[in-house]
Image: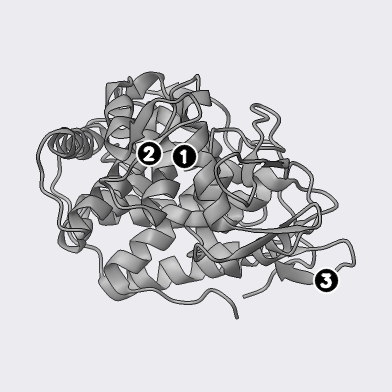
Amino acid sequence: MKHKTGQTLTLCLLTCLGCTTVDPPADLSPLTNVDADDLRKKLDDELEYTFGRRLDLKQQATWQILHGALAYQREFEVIDAESETVSAVDYLLAGGAMSGWDIELVPSRIRPNPGIRALLDPGSKAGQGHQDQWFAVLAQCDLAPEQTIKVYGETVTMADFVFQVQQDVPRNLGREYSWTLIGLTTYLPTDAEWTGSDGGQWSIERLMEIELEQDLNRSACGGTHRLIGITMALNRHLAQGGELTGVWKQADDKIQESIAQAKRLQNRADGSFSIHYFDRPGMSADLAQDLGSTGHVLEFLALAMTKEQLSEPWVQHSVTHLCELFHRTREIGLECGALYHAAHGLVLYRQRVFGARSWKP
């Protein structure tokens, strides 16, 4: 595997074949299973190559870098100010400076330690774009509650981050709790209840209710982030012995409906998912747009479906298509959100179907 030294990713979505949106051609021929060994090799080849794309602290910001960490977790590496290759997550935990890593310590009246709050900077493509996005990414990096974090010379922990997120749920005026659910259900049982900074009673179930009320088609990335948060919370609820009743039954219904809709709207000609996500059919000659929609939908499916379901031909064909898309764009600078959400989808698929592995050489 050959990589260009210091290869970086640009902020621009590079359109490879134009921006034309077309109606998907009808293709009702039956799909056949893909050879499992061939599929695993394609996954490993493309994920190894993508791991080797290097971001540089002098050129990229937290928004790009933590998307990489979402896919590859603590193994994801960046080039620091001294031109050394370091773990991006470990660098942040040790108090390293990074453009867009805007964190503040919040004094508490009910506990000795301050809380940690990540500030929003939506649309900047440098700072946090969604409420609790950084918290959720770090939570998915398998950090223990006792994991220390250096902030302005003070040592705090992930538990302090959890506490502040709980306190701040009333501040989420956009009512987007996708990332909040991902992070909180990593550290709290799904029957957790607490008092927020508004004095109101909050719970994981209340956050789920709010998420389930939202319109997927009017949500970021076609509603995939909401579905991922709902799915991860439900998976943890069931793993803790919870039952499919009340809001959890509603969540399962939403997930199953969305799986069926993704399959219904899939472009059978090439295996890609609709560029309109769960709303209506559509495909595009723009490879970057294809990468974004197919990658985000696969990311959801890899969390929501069983190993047996993920081995069905229609899902295998979407994975094959995404691997081919990665291969065709190897030498192209890609927008990091689309690239690394797609990589995360492939990593999750690889874990669920073939088992986990390290991506470091």
Q: Is residue 184 left or right of residue 17?
A: left
Out of 83 and 183, give the one closest to the viewer. Answer: 183
Q: Amino acid at mark 2?
A: Trp
User: Does the rendering let one see residue 340?
Assistant: no
Q: Nearest the camera: 174 or 217?
A: 174
* x then y, percent, for residue 112: 62, 51
**Residue 84 has which mark?**
3
Image point (88%, 61%), residue name: 81
Question: CB atoms at circles 1 and 2 under 8 Å apart?
Answer: yes
Label 3 Cα crowd, 10 Å radius (few <14 / some 14-19 / many 20+): few
Per the rendering, the mark at residue 194 is: 2
Residue 302 higher or lower than 166, as above or below: below
**Where residue 7 sits: x, y (%)?**
75, 60
Instruction: Find the residue positioned furthest to the right.
Output: 82
* Quadrant location, the C terminus: bottom right
Q: In this orientation, which residue lies closer to the viewer: 100 or 14? A: 100
Say the numbered circle drawn on residue 166: 1
Mark 1 → mark 3, Cα distance in angstroms: 36 Å
Can see residue 97? Answer: yes
Q: CA distance from mark 2 to mark 3?
A: 43 Å
